[in-house]
């Protein structure tokens, strides 16, 4: 089995609606800015093609995979496309277990202690806290108090460079970043500016 490696920069770019024809340029911009985890959600057309195009770039030290992965079939399809990252909005142990068996890095969505422990038991490597706005800072603090030490906790939903510090104080160890980073139609210059703002902020907080 492939050795699973935690992303050096635990910021996951959520590329919802990424056009396969634009995938290479978008991935190059994000990698140059410092992103090392790229997620293409499966609930938009062309996701698997976009994943395959990014994987073919062989970007150094970069996890590439799928988001909104809800079924074992999704896991198999992303793996076949070359993806090695599972991200989901929910906790389905069979889905997590399958991805872990294939050597994928697993970051399923959880919002409660029961979901968090079920996810870890199934083989999750990181916990996507979703929706982060609902769980809140207090919820993450409480969750961290009972989770195994060192468990990566990544809030997702409504994260911006301006809000990252408060999440880190609450216990966040990374983030999933969607619409504040990438939306269909964003220019590469805009994407570069947004990506650099997130990475710069993260590096300042992580020191």
Image: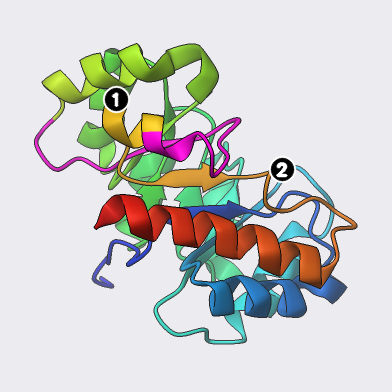
Percent position of residue 139, x then y:
33, 14
Mark 1 / mark 2, whichever is N-terminal: 1
Q: Which residues are magenta?
A: 148-165
150 within the magenta span: yes
Secondary structure under the numbered disc 1 in the rendered image: helix
The quarter of the image holding the N terminus is bottom left
Q: Is residue 139 left or right of residue 46?
A: left
**In this rendering, is residue 137 above or below 93?**
above
What residue is at 43 percent from the left and 15 percent from the top? 135
* Residue occupying the point 33% across, 43% down: 97
- Secondary element at image label 2: loop
Q: Quadrant of residue 158?
A: top right
- Residue 10 appearing in the image: no
> Mark 1 or 2, which is nearer the eye?
2
Determine the main secondary structure of the stretch shown in magenta: loop
Vertical comparison of 132 with 10: above or below: above
Answer left or right for 1 relative to 82: left
Q: Is residue 206 magenta?
A: no
The residue at the far left in this view is 149
Indicate the position of residue 112 as horizontal and vertical percent values. Answer: 35, 14
Give me the disc on residue 179.
Answer: 2
Q: Is residue 106 left or right of residue 17?
A: left
Residue 102: x, y in percent? 36, 61
85 in relation to 108, above or below: below
- Left or right, 143 with respect to 23, comes to left
């Amino acid at each position: 089995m492939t050795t699973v490696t935690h992303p050096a920069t635990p910021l996951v770019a959520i590329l919802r609606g990424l056009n396969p024809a634009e995938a290479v340029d978008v991935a190059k911009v994000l990698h140059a800015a410092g992103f090392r985890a790229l997620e293409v959600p499966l609930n938009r057309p062309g996701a698997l093609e976009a994943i395959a195009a990014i994987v073919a770039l062989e970007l150094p030290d970069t996890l590439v995979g799928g988001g909104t992965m809800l079924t074992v079939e999704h896991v198999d399809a992303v793996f076949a496309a070359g993806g090695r990252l599972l991200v989901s909005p929910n906790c389905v142990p069979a889905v997590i277990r399958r991805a872990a068996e294939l050597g994928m890095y697993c970051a399923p969505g959880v919002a409660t202690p029961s979901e968090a422990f079920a996810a870890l038991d199934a083989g999750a490597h990181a916990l996507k806290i979703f929706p982060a706005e609902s769980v809140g800072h207090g919820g993450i603090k409480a969750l961290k108090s009972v989770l195994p030490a060192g468990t990566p906790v990544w809030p997702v939903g409504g994260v911006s460079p301006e809000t990252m510090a408060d999440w880190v104080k609450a216990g966040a160890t990374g983030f999933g970043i969607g619409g504040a980073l990438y939306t269909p139609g964003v220019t590469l210059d805009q994407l570069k500016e947004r990506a650099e703002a997130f990475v710069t902020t993260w590096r300042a907080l992580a020191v």
